[in-house]
Image (spheres, rainbow, N blue to C red):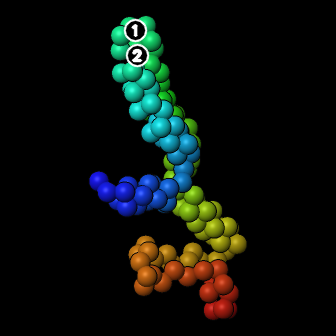
Amino acid sequence: MKGDEIKTIISRAGEIRVHNALNPLLWLLAVSTPICWIAAYWFRDDATLKYIFVAMSTLPIFGSILAYFLLFWLDRDRLQSEEFVLRQKELSIIERKGRTPIPYDLDIGETANIPTIEDTRKEK
């Protein structure tokens, strides 16, 4: 890989489009697990340290799996993106006020026609 390709990959990794409760744990998994594997390889002659680092590398993996299932069963909204949750709350507020929900276009391309609250106020 060339240097420009690596910079592009790193910059794209920072542009996460879905933000949910698992993101910090997944970043910890992505950083700590390879570091622990490298450390286990580095200390491959010392059996105690090698197995300690291997065990430490499995903690974020099992922690992520456990956190996912806990959130899945206890609070599913935390697994959704922030945008989805905000849109869901906005629609519930609109429905509580007795208005009909705003049609939502799922196409998020450049030609998307996503009405806003201001658009609905102009219609009145």
Residue depicted at 51% across the width and 37% down the height: 28
Q: Are the residues flagged by discs 1 and 2 in contact, CB closer than 8 Å?
A: yes
Q: Nearer the viewer, residue 69 or 14?
A: 14
Q: Quadrant of the C terminus?
A: bottom right
Position of 53 relative to 23 (above/below): above
**Quarter where residue 112 is shown:** bottom left
User: Which residue is at the far right?
Assistant: 97
Task: Examine the rendering and report whether any part of residue 82 can be seen.
Answer: yes
Left or right placement of residue 21 versus residue 33 in this view: right
Q: Which mark is residue 46?
A: 1
Position of 37 relative to 3 (above/below): above
Position of 80 relative to 113 (above/below): above
Residue depicted at 35% across the width and 10% down the height: 45
> Dot 2 surroundings within 10 Å: few (below 14), some, or many (20 or more)?
some
**At numbered mark 1, what does the secondary structure look like: helix, strand or loop?**
loop
Disc 2 marks which residue?
43
Query: Residue 75, how many percent across, how many down?
Result: 56, 42
Residue depicted at 57% across the width and 75% down the height: 101
